Amino acid sequence: MMRWSTIRSMHLITKRLLVIRGLRSIGQGAMVVDLTLYLKDLHWSGVGIGGVTTAAGLVGAALILLVGVLSDRLGRRVFLLIYETLTLISAILASFTTYALILILGIVIAGFGRGQSGAAGPFGPAEQAWLARHVKQANRGLVFSLNNAAGFIGMAIGAVIGGLPGLYHHVAPIVAYRPVFLMVGFLSLVCISILLMTKEEPIQRPAPGTSEQHDSQATSPVALNEEEQQVRKRENRSILKLALVNTLNGLAVGLTGPMMAYWFSLRYGVSTSAIGATLSISFLMTGIFSIVMGYLAQRMGMVRSVTWMRVIGSIFMIILPFMPNFALASILFVLRGAINRGTQGNRTALSASLTRDHRRGFASSINALSMRLPSSIGPTISGFLFDAGDLSLPLLLTAGLQLINAAIYQWVFGSYDKRDNPPSQPAP
């Protein structure tokens, strides 16, 4: 098992990225609670709320691939600065107007309400690649789980804050929710400050005709070039497999993830504060469970740990819509969220290990894109079903899709747990 001394010895950039993740996630946690309820208070329909969330996913999907490829060439820090700046501007504007276009821009560009566990939205591939660069392969399961934990613990804090507007029923919605938007903007400003103090080393790319695995004086340039092509092909196959497996999970996440606060409101008629408290506990338990998953990856393997937790989480999701009251539903939701989302660090660690450093942004973008595109469709489907009075079907569809995904994930990547080397790198 990994010792805590490994954590204390982490690279300074790794520590700063973990801090940024935690700070950013506080605002995201508040937005998960408040955004759909804020739009509901502004008399948006379920289809309207789901539609704008879908649009946000589609725009984010287009940006993801572009950011991943460019970050491998231009560096990662600049894209995180762009994301935080856009979030800062969107939060300030949204705090002073209910104009639909402004709110849509905040949702689409900054990803308000999507609950990204502290990730930098469509700019996340740059952040993941930067983090992976300073973490050894053997340590990634643990460090990425800690990164996931920082995000969800921050979201737990944010969800508590997100429940505060429910205490101010006597004022206009924009006044009640304004402090939350301003808090999101302030946290982005702090993240910008940390990024400006953090230097990024240039990305080292292999020279033409050479390989990262051998001494160029010992092997001919032609052989090295052929070997590089073979390594790249193996990397591409691994990336494609992961993207195909992610598609089902992405659709499942989109059906319920951004819409659960709205679902609780419709299903049980509870207040913003009650929903905020439930989501907060769920995020906190997910953060704690993410740390546990980091160690389970050491014993069970990254893939197997994900598979079994997803199966258990899917069973809980099947039961959830049949809970007779909010208290029981909340308990089940908390357990399901901790078990299912706590595996995110291990899943990210796997995707970050499929390629070498100079292609990691591209790999992370394909991984994120394969989740974002199908998940973009989900909110519109759920919004339509909610408006039609069917509150159970979206949750049951989520459970079914994730059960299928768990089986395929284990089948395709189960052998990875037995490997001593990343699939993209031949054994010495």
Image (tube, helix red, strand yellow):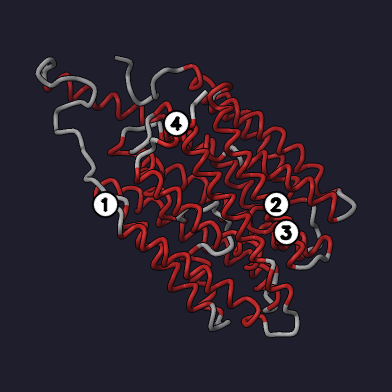
The reply to whether discs 3 and 1 touch (Cβ–Cβ < 8 Å) is: no
The reply to whether discs 3 and 2 touch (Cβ–Cβ < 8 Å) is: yes
Whether residue 92 is visible to the viewer of this picture, yes or no, is yes
Residue placed at 67% from the left, 42% from the top? Answer: 338
Mark 4 residue type: Ser
Element assignment for label 4: helix
The reply to whether discs 3 and 4 touch (Cβ–Cβ < 8 Å) is: no
Q: Position of residue 365 (x, y in %)?
A: 40, 46
Residue extending furthest right? 324
Dot 4 surroundings within 10 Å: few (below 14), some, or many (20 or more)? few
Mark 3 residue type: Ala
The reply to whether discs 2 and 4 touch (Cβ–Cβ < 8 Å) is: no
Element assignment for label 1: loop
Residue placed at 66% from the left, 28% from the top? Answer: 308
Distance of label 3 from label 2 (alpha carbons): 6 Å
Camera-near label (3 vs 4) is 4
Element assignment for label 3: helix
According to the picture, the residue beneath numbered tag 4 turns out to be: 5
Mark 1 residue type: Lys
Q: Nearer the viewer, residue 192 or 58?
A: 192
Residue placed at 72% from the left, 33% from the top? Answer: 312
Mark 2 residue type: Ile
According to the picture, the residue beneath numbered tag 1 turns out to be: 199
According to the picture, the residue beneath numbered tag 2 turns out to be: 281
Lower sequence index among marks 2 and 4 = 4
